[in-house]
Image: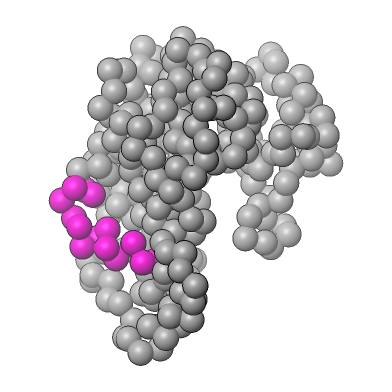
């Protein structure tokens, strides 16, 4: 795999500076970047000054947090990556608030040493009890109309819970993953030929955390999965999003053994410079 490209699929919606900060850290002759910019966001600032190995996803999605549109953005990205001219061996899904915790050489070496492995979080019941609940209930987060939450409650009160096929195990946890091109191609083909599966997740809650994970967990590639997103995040505040990382978190971040961490603010307190200093020689 050492001669194959590593594609970084970056989901962005507000920070060209964050995207370029991430790209600059991950630059190498083997790196190629595919950027999905939310359709609600002006694309021009992201394009200006972009290096030649940065491509922008043409089929952009208008993303609502927690909705299927995040899944669609990722499907569109994986499709354009697999259809590209590049000989890609690995696809890494990242956000614009992510930053590497290792030098690019160490990251590439890690993936070369784990060539067939798909790093994707696959928690299942009973360790992930709300995984099935998210799918059985109806959620209307794809829409923005007034009163949608009231309608959502009414629908879930009137209608029986949706049925998950008996041969399908819901798996997931983290949206972020690092998968092989083979796994990405499998997901794309699965989506094409399984519209009922897509409908099941289209009206679920936060399907980006279980859609691809469930596909791969129930696939012939299950044995290649390591349940790890390779990402340091801090959920100690028990909020919908992880804690913003600062210098106070440096020791925990740098000793985590992870390849990446999030979320970092654009106006950080020196944590990015410290990470660069500590990883300059690894």
* Overall secondary structure of the magenta section: helix
Q: Position of residue 118 (x, y in %)?
A: 38, 38
Identify which residue is drawn at 64% across, 28% down: 17
Identify which residue is drawn at 73% across, 59% down: 237
Total residue callouts: 0
Q: Note whether residue 138 is visible.
A: yes
Looking at the image, the residue that sits furthest to the top is 29
Residue 194 colored in magenta in the image: yes
Looking at the image, the residue that sits furthest to the left is 193
Q: Position of residue 218 (x, y in %)?
A: 27, 54
Q: Is residue 211 left or right of residue 82?
A: right
Q: Note whether residue 205 is visible.
A: no
Q: Is residue 197 left or right of residue 20?
A: left
Q: Is residue 112 left or right of residue 23?
A: left
Looking at the image, the residue that sits furthest to the bottom is 158
Determine which quarter of the picture holds residue 159: bottom left
Q: Position of residue 68 (x, y in %)?
A: 39, 56
Asked which colour scheme the image uses, the reply is: one colour
Identify which residue is drawn at 83% across, 34% down: 269
Residue 78 colored in magenta in the image: no
* Residue 152 against residue 65 in the figure, above or below: below
* Residue 182 against residue 200 in the figure, above or below: above
Determine which quarter of the picture holds residue 270: top right
Q: Position of residue 25 (x, y in %)?
A: 61, 20
Determine which quarter of the picture holds residue 166: bottom left
Q: Is residue 268 left or right of residue 191?
A: right
Image quadrant where one finds the N terminus: top left
Magenta-highlighted residues = 190-206
Image quadrant where one finds the C terminus: top right
């Amino acid at each position: 795999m050492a001669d194959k490209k590593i594609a970084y699929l970056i989901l962005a919606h507000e920070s060209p500076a964050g995207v370029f900060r991430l790209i600059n850290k991950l630059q190498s002759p083997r790196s190629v970047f595919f950027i999905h910019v939310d359709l609600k966001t002006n694309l021009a600032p992201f394009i200006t000054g972009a290096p030649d190995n940065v491509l922008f996803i043409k089929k952009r999605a208008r993303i609502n947090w927690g909705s299927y549109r995040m899944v669609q953005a990722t499907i569109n990205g994986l499709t354009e990556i697999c259809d590209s001219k590049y000989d890609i061996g690995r696809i890494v899904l990242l956000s614009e608030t992510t930053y590497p915790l290792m030098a690019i050489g160490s990251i590439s070496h890690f993936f070369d040493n784990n060539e067939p492995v798909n790093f994707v979080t696959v928690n299942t019941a009973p360790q992930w009890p709300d995984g099935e609940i998210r799918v059985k209930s109806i959620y209307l987060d794809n829409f923005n109309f007034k009163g949608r939450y009231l309608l959502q409650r009414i629908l879930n009160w009137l209608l029986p819970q949706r049925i998950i096929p008996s041969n399908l195990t819901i798996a997931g946890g983290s949206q972020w993953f690092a998968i092989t091109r083979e796994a990405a191609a499998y997901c794309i083909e699965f989506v094409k030929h399984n519209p009922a599966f897509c409908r099941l997740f289209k009206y679920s809650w936060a399907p980006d955390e279980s859609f691809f994970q469930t596909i791969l967990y129930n696939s012939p590639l299950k044995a290649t999965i390591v349940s790890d997103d390779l990402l340091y995040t801090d959920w100690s505040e028990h909020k919908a999003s992880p804690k913003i990382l600062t210098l106070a978190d440096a020791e925990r971040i740098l000793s985590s053994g992870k390849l990446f961490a999030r979320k970092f603010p654009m106006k950080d307190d020196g944590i990015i410079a410290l990470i660069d200093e500590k990883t300059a020689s690894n």
